[in-house]
Image (cartoon, rainbow, N blue to C red):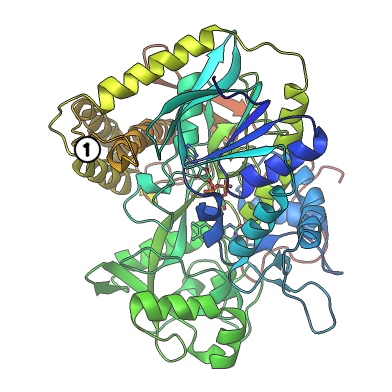
Amino acid sequence: MTPSHDVVLVGGGGAGLRAAIAIAETNPRLSIAVVSKVYPMRSHTVSAEGGSAGAIGADDSTDEHAYDTISGGDWLCDQDAVEAFVTEAPEELLRLERWGCPWNREADGRIAVRPFGGMKKKRTWFAADKTGFHMLHTLFQTSLKYASVVRYDEWFVTRLLVDDGRVQGVVAIDLQSGKIEAITARSVILCTGGCGKIFPFTTNASIKSGDGMALAYRAGAPLKDMEFLQYHPTGLPFTGILITEAARSEGGYLINKDGYRYLQDYALGTPQKEPVLRTMELGPRDRLSQAFMKELEKGRTIETPYGHVVHLDLRHLGEKKIDAKIPFVRELCRKYQNLDPVKDLIPVRPVLHYMMGGVHTDIDGATPLAGLYAAGEVACVSINGANRLGSNSLTELLVFGARAGKAAAEHASRNLEISQSVLGQARDEHRRIEQELLNKKGSERIADLREEMQKTMEESAGIYRTGASLMKAVDRLRSVQERYANVAIEDRSKAFNTERVSALELSNMLGVAETIVMSALRREESRGAHQRTDFPKRDDKRFLGHSLVHRNPDGSARVEYLPVTITRWPPAERIYGEAAPHGGSNKAPGSSLPS
Ligand SMILES: Cc1cc2nc3c(=O)[nH]c(=O)nc-3n(C[C@H](O)[C@H](O)[C@H](O)COP(=O)(O)OP(=O)(O)OC[C@H]3O[C@@H](n4cnc5c(N)ncnc54)[C@H](O)[C@@H]3O)c2cc1C
């Protein structure tokens, strides 16, 4: 019997579990499948450290959170989505507390909030520096309350089933037995996370291979703003392990080889004793990563066997504060870098961290393909625009996980039939996997192809890009694609065939890499995290729009544009440092619209 549910969730991370709870609450009669290629608690959400944003302080407002998000995103965010996001953020965070999330508190009992990059008020809720761990635990244990949630742990989804213009389920491999099965449903929500593994140096877990983006794209749903990838300024040089922004929000400095706080040279303000919001080390991530590249050009970085680095200096914070507020930073430095930040400098360099783009959805997580929804890092709603502010992502999982869950539940509650033809599609997929990935003798090694793809992306589509570098990437990726047709799979076993999974993930990453490069090539301007040295200025006349990449019937990519939704904050210059617009105004500098 083909397993059948009302809603299939692909992904058991923060977005997936929040959506599962929302579905169960919206319609308790619906049967919900959570399909995840790893046990849910191993999803990448578990590794988030710094915190989750939501305006709660007496001096803060949702309008200010909206303005910071929109200016941080270089005016590419859809402002209606941002308004919904900032309004629902504190409600979601409080709900999480009622479900058991142990937020840090002040001595007087109020929720503690910390400053975060690009935010002009303290609004990042945290549970020490293991926020994602606590959030995911809370969501996981809450999801266990609902008997209607059925889990398919360690099942890998390879295809969406589409008929009659509607998504009607998925095909997945049960990794334990090797069995390939269709799981039908009236709604499918993709919650598969990001795609950092397309790049060689990343904070992302190795499971982050953009599977959901590839699934949606192949099924005919467009991907949005794929050229916008975030580099986090502080990764450990060899492993790429993240040193959370919380280290800077607690007062850490970034210094170059001369011990100089170099960010003062990049229009990010002047050094102060205490951290100043939106200034210096608390500037936005795109600007900080770009400043590193400029320091590198000036010869002011430090060469190491694992690339050039600058230093993060926490020594002046003292042991007590480090142990109280960022204990995990100390633990990571000791274990992986063999140093103690209480007395040593931490070598850091920019590291690929987050995907702003993703599956194109509306404000309720719906894609243009009926029955298909997306939420979390795999989706582009878009609230992150051209550059996400740290700590907005965890909140996005909650707000848009819940919204997508509700919308998918309503769709699944309608009386829609599952077509018989999707079972035929599932048999085709079964044959394809057997033929291409179990019974074939190729000669190309997966690791070689993956390395070539990652090198191509770093060299051609990294922090700075040009038309020429991107054109080169198109050719190099095409050649890797051709070689992939001859990939070698030596492991013929069925149970936990990780080689087969790696091949499928590589195929997904190659598809997603192409969409990134094609979107980057079309956008002839510099905005947020997309910096074209051949077009160094933001160009609102031509490019105040979302790129949408569609797959043509012949498999090639086609890029179109969609206008950005502007509600109350017309495009303005991004200003950081002491000159940044502080205070309670919700108007953009130079705004002439009534608020
Ligand atoms: C080290 C690190 C620290 C971070 N810190 C912060 C922070 O402090 N604050 C913040 O706001 N953001 C932070 N982020 C970003 C944030 O954590 C992520 O964007 C977010 O957790 C993604 O959640 P998700 O639910 O979308 O996906 P994930 O948590 O990545 O979950 C994806 C799920 O999809 C499943 N899946 C994927 N492909 C398939 C497939 N083919 N078949 C079946 N299942 C599949 C996986 O098994 C998994 O369950 C951090 C990110 C990293 C990497």
- Please name the residue shown 52% across and 76% down the image: 328
Q: Which is more toward the observer, 39 or 308?
A: 39
**Where's residue 311, x and y in %?**
39, 78
> Is the residue indicated by label 1 positioned so its CB lies within 8 Å of ligand 1?
no
Across the whole image, how many numbered discs are drawn on residues? 1
Label 1 neighbourhood size at 10 Å, few (<14), some (14-19), many (20+)?
A: few
Q: Which is more toward the observer, 272 or 137?
A: 137
The answer to which image quadrant residue 347 occupies is bottom left
Is residue 419 placed above or below 370 in the rendered structure?
above
| Type of the residue with mark 1 | Asp
**Where's residue 137, x and y in %?**
64, 59
Residue that badge 1 annotates: 491
Q: Which is more toward the observer, 394 or 168?
A: 168
Can residue 290 be seen from the camera position used here?
Answer: yes
The answer to which image quadrant residue 104 occupies is bottom right
**Where's residue 344, x and y in %?**
39, 88
Q: Residue furthest left?
A: 443
**Would residue 399 appear left or right of 98 to someone viewing this image?**
left
Q: Residue furthest front?
A: 1
Q: Quadrant of the N terminus?
A: top right
Can residue 255 be seen from the camera position used here?
Answer: no
Is residue 304 placed above or below 593 in the rendered structure?
below
Question: Could you tell me which secondary element the residue under label 1 belongs to?
Answer: loop
**Where's residue 377, x and y in %?**
56, 44
- Please name the residue shown 62% across and 50% down the image: 14
**Would residue 589 appear left or right of 266 to someone viewing this image?**
right
